[in-house]
Amino acid sequence: MEYPYNFDSFRSYYGKFTPLVQSKVSNEPSGTLNGTLEERILSVIRKSPHITQAEIECSERKVKRLMKTMIDKGMIERVGGRKMGQWIEK
């Protein structure tokens, strides 16, 4: 079967060709999107505890909702005020 596209020119233009479906083997939490977002938020808090929810690179509404559940679970805590406070991982 011959394809109408030249994948060699595609690779040279876009770089490394990656298939649409990849097998993923890692130690990251699997299953839900919230698990990976929680890990990303925790890593951002570790790097910069004074960061605001609006500064995290994701939908601000999604970040607020997820951080609220993380506070309820006891994973993180906000210490201090709105302007000079910081996030602490428990």
Image: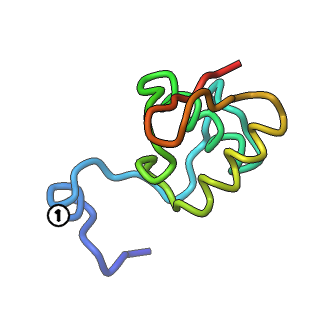
User: In the shown orientation, is residue 31 left or right of residue 20?
Assistant: right
Q: Please, what secondary structure does the residue beneath circle 1 have?
A: helix
Q: How is the image coloured?
A: rainbow
Residue behind mark 1: 9
Q: Quadrant of residue 83?
A: top left
Q: Which residue corresponds to the image point at 73% horizontal and 47% vertical from the top-left?
A: 68
Q: Which residue corresponds to the image point at 51% horizontal and 48% vertical from the top-left?
A: 53
Q: Quadrant of the C terminus?
A: top right
Q: Residues within 10 Å of mark 1 (few under 14, many from 20)?
A: few
User: In the shown orientation, is residue 7 left or right of residue 80?
Assistant: left
**Farthest-out residue, top:** 90
73 or 40: nearer the viewer: 73
**Farthest-out residue, right:** 73
Indicate the amino acid at tag 1: Ser
Q: Quadrant of residue 84?
A: top left
Find residue 5 and report its horizontal and vertical position in percent: 29, 75
Q: Which residue corresponds to the image point at 73% horizontal and 39% vertical from the top-left?
A: 30
User: In the shown orientation, is residue 20 left or right of residue 39?
Assistant: left
Find residue 89 and report its horizontal and vertical position in percent: 64, 22
Q: Which residue corresponds to the image point at 84% horizontal and 34% vertical from the top-left?
A: 73
82 or 9: nearer the viewer: 82
Find residue 75 and report its horizontal and vertical position in percent: 74, 28
Quick check: 18 above or below 30?
below
18 or 40: nearer the viewer: 40
Find residue 88 and report its horizontal and vertical position in percent: 61, 23
Q: Quadrant of the N terminus?
A: bottom left
